[in-house]
Each structure stands twice: as C-alpha cells, then as structure tokens.
Image (tube, rainbow, N blue to C red):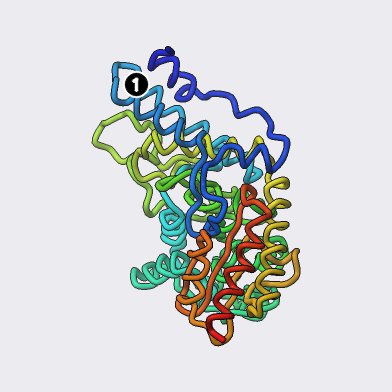
Amino acid sequence: MPGIDDLTDGLAAGAPAPAAATGPAAYAAHFEAPDGYLDFARYGPPSRDVLDATAGALTRSAHADHTTVNALMRADLRARESAARLAGTDAEHTVLIPNTTTGLFQAAFGILEGEVLVPEGDFPANHYPWRRTAAAGLARPRWLPAGPAGATTPEAVREALTGDVVAVAVSAVDFRTGHRADLAALRDVIGPDRLLVVDAIQGFGVVEMPWQAADVVVAGGQKWLRAGWSTGFAALSDRALERLAPTLTGWTGVEDVALFDNAEHPPLAGAGRLSLTNLSPVSAAAFAAALELVEATGVAVIEAAVAERVGELIEAVRARGGELLSPVEPARRAGIVSFRLPGVPAAKAAEALHAHGLTPTVRADSLRLSPHASTPASVAGRVAEALASVSASAG
C-alpha cells in the first residue's frame, strides 16, 4: 500500500494536470452527484479528484513534520496558475480568495472616490461592498435599473455614464435568469479610464467569455467549478493594480512577508496585494484539482454540453406551459433556466420535481434549473413528467 508521502507529496508539490478528457462523458466520469441534480448555480458537488486532493492534503497535515506546511502551501501557486490560464492572464495577476464576496470587497475598498454603476437587480454580493464603501466615505454606488431578463446592457451603461463614474461592477451571468453580459461591449463603452469589475461565479469555467476585458474578475469555486466551499480567486489587470488602493491589504499581501521587523511593508506589486492572511492549503489543493479538471476537459466542451442540456430543459418547460424567464437566444444565455408555472405556486412545482428525483433552486415565485456537463439527456424527460404531474393535479 502506498505510504502517506506517496499519496500526498505529488499533490502538495504540484502534480501535473489530469490527462486530457475526450468529451462530456469523460468529464462526467469524475463525479458521483445524482443524475437529477439541477442546482449547480447554487452549489456544484465536487469531483472525486477534489475529494482525493482534500483527503490527501488533510492526511499530510495530520502527520506533520518540518516539511509539511511549506509543501502544502505550494498548492496555492498550482491553483493560481490554473485559474490564471483559464482567465487569460498569469499567476502574478491572480490571487486566491476564500469566496467571491471577499474579492468584491477588496476591489470596492480599493476605489477611494467617485461613483460605481451597479445593477440594482444583481446578487447581493455585488451590492453590499458598495454600500459599505459609501458609508465609509469612499466609492458610491449608482444603481442601474434591470433590463429584460436581468440584462445589464452596454446601452444602459452608456446612458448612465457621467464624469463621476469611475467603475462599473456587474455579474458575468445573471443569477436569476442566466443572461450573459457582453463584457467586450461593456469594455468598449466605458473606455480605458474606468474599471470593469466582474463577479464571474455564475460563468467562470462553464462559459467562454472575454475575461481579459475586465479589470477585476472574481469567482468562488463552490458552484460551477465544483471545488467545494472556501475556494476562489481574483484576477487583476495592470490597470486595476495601478488604480486600486491597497486599503484592505493584510500581512500576507506585502513584500518581505517573513521579515517580522515591526515595520509596515509595502504592498506586493501583483494581485497578491489582495491577500489578507494565509488561506487553507487544503482548500487550495481542492481548488487546483477542480480547475485542472476544467482545463483538461476544455471550457468549450463543457459549455457545449451545458448548452445542449439547457436547450432540452427549455423545451420541456415550454411544452408543459411554463413561462420562461431566461433568455431565448442561445448566445445570450448561460447554464440557467428560470421559469414559473402560471397558476401553480413555486413550492408546489418544486414538490413534483423532488418527487421525480430532481433538485432545482426554489425561489418564492419561480424555479431555476441549472445543469452541468455531467447532467444526462434523460433529465429533460423527467422534468417534463414532473411538470405534467403538477399541472394535472392543479387542474
């Protein structure tokens, strides 16, 4: 039987990425989530790769010696390098964060003055950082009215631009409807003198988007990346590094981090300046494993498989009289299908889906289905059967 070091040394030191997958079936083989799980926009059950990485790092930490901490900490670089490749940047412009909110707060408190355009219907993680900066006398939010299907359009942003606007903060994919923002067009509209801050959690790793158009890209790893909780990253452009003040830089975000001389050290030149303290190397190992699986499969492969499942689910919902809340045009949607059944409470429709072994997101007035590349085609038929049963009982 392999020893503990055999199981974990390669992981900690930076093992190579998994062999290239051949398609959705090869990707799906890494997971054990039930076929009817359709709640990836809320949480993505991790792969066996992530479970093994977590167990390996924890096992190594339980048998600690003089090499353990330094060896486990190398997973941070491995995860940053993989996230950077997927974001179209490099490790120096990338930092690990424990969740999306932390990255958004770091960006928000780095903007010392001016107005930031923020969609009023966006997820609260992109609201509270700007509310807090306003209360602290720093950047002030100006709320953009939501467009059709939760869209934040370049046209709406253009109309709202004034000389006081220093940044725009949007979600890459709307959490309610799955509407995909046009990041390239937003970049063109705001020009080079304003920052574009993007909450990428509902799209990163599952949708190909021009992440380089943004100045700050933040994403937690617990949803579509399927890395588990307390994982995530932020990628910063040169423009962001130039303009964001290191307001919340912690002791690990400075130069000569191991020199304890009672002096204030200057912040790091790269994205590492967003670091507050050392994060869990166990989470970093899990995140690296999840990211490398995405790389090995290919975002284009994952996106195509998700798009196929989304199309099938939309047909199933419409066939049963569902009112679609998500965009119809494939190019404008990601992995989310939101709908309501006229005359049927969302909770009642959810009961029918649950009875058919399906897991949706349940809102007060609607339901959200979010499949992944591992979701089988048979799920659409089960959704149709479930909705037919609730429609029949309602009638």
Residue under pointer 1: 68
Q: What x and y, as percent, mark residue 174?
A: 58, 67
Front residue (pair 180, 302) = 302
Q: Secondary structure at mark 1?
A: helix
**Which residue sits at x=54%, y=38%?**
92
In the displayed structure, would residue 130 be above or below residue 11? below
Q: Quadrant of the N terminus?
A: top left
Q: Quadrant of the C terminus?
A: bottom right
User: What residue sits 65% from the left and 28% below the top?
Assistant: 19
Please give left or right for residue 279 compared with residue 143 in the image.
left
- In the image, 384 versus 138, the foreground residue is 384
In the rendered image, which quarter is residue 145 located in?
A: bottom right
Observer-nearest of 344 and 386: 386
The kind of residue tagged 1 is Thr
Quarter of the image where one finds residue 130: bottom left
| Image x and y of residue 134, in percent | 39, 72
